Amino acid sequence: MLVLGLTGVIGSGKSKVAQMFADLGAGIIDCDVIAHQLTQSGSPVVSRLVAVFGQQIVDENNNLLRDKLRQIVFDVPELRAKLEQLLHPLIYQQVVAQLNSPVKVKYWIIVVPLLFKSPKYLQLIQRSIVVDCDYSLLVERLQRRSKLSPLEVDAILATQVPREEQLALADDVIENNRDEAYLYQQVKRLHDDYISRYCNAE
């Protein structure tokens, strides 16, 4: 079955695009959603995180304080590497399990924020999709959604695969600079292309 990778910088609109593909019959496997599920209150993963990063990353009910953890690891590459070493293998296991599940979908899309830094995921997919938008729109969306300042946005972008590199590596690009109708037109065009080129022969 066709497996696609969907990526883009923070605030580009990956979740919205993924939902549009889902509405057309694609199966969506979102690595961020899996990470969130793995770190729910009471999860053994939270206990392992506390053992590494300390009690400061949970509240009195042992709920993970995600913003606090993000703050701790953001500026320290060694700590960020520890977090990735703990979480990434577990996320990958869940991704593979979902790909091998008996769920009936037209094709699979794996949403991976750092797709082009992730050889394991690149080996799983046949094509890559990058959701792209202008920098000014990206900053505006993140200010509205997450109350991030332009400086905070720039700091996050510095840890991600540069936009220009993503566009150069992408098999397909979806531009998210206009309204939802225009966005859907691009999704539908790619969906129809994937069905005709890859799925009808199956």
Image (spheres, rainbow, N blue to C red):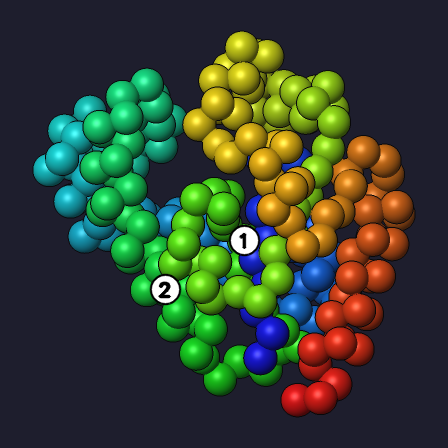
Hey, what amino acid is under mark 2?
Gln
**What is the quadrant of the C terminus in the image?**
bottom right
**What is the quadrant of the N terminus in the image?**
bottom right
Vertical arrangement, residue 1 with respect to residue 39, above or below = below
Identify the residue shown where x is 35% and y is 32%. Answer: 66
Identify the residue shown where x is 44% and y is 71%. Answer: 98
Hey, what amino acid is under mark 1?
Val
Identify the residue shown where x is 51% and y is 15%. Answer: 152
Identify the residue shown where x is 59% and y is 36%. Answer: 165
Q: Residue 199 carries which label?
A: none
Dividing the picture into quarters, in which one does residue 61 lie?
Answer: top left
Q: Where is residue 199 in the image (x, y as percent from the top left)?
A: 70, 81
Direction from residue 98 to residue 196 in the image, left or right: right
Q: Residue 111 carries which label?
A: 1
Q: Where is residue 137 in the image (x, y as percent from the top left)?
A: 74, 24
Dividing the picture into quarters, in which one does residue 136 lie?
Answer: top right
Q: Where is residue 79 in the image (x, y as percent from the top left)?
A: 22, 29
- CA distance separating discs 1 and 2: 13 Å
Q: Residues within 10 Å of mark 1 (few under 14, many from 20)?
A: many
Direction from residue 23 to residue 72 in the image, left or right: left
Instruction: Residue 14: tell me if it is visible.
Output: no
Task: Determine the secondary structure under disc 1.
Answer: strand
Q: Position of residue 133 (x, y in %)?
A: 73, 33
Q: How crowded is mark 2: few (under 14 residues within 10 Å), some or many (20 or more)?
A: some
Outermost residue on the bottom side: it is 202
Total numbered badges shown on the rendered structure? 2
Direction from residue 185 to residue 86 in the image, left or right: left
Task: Determine the secondary structure under disc 2.
Answer: helix
Upstream in the sequence, badge 1 or badge 2?
2
The residue closer to the viewer here, 23 or 106, is 106
Q: Name the residue under label 2.
A: 94
Vertical arrangement, residue 93 with respect to residue 85, above or below = below
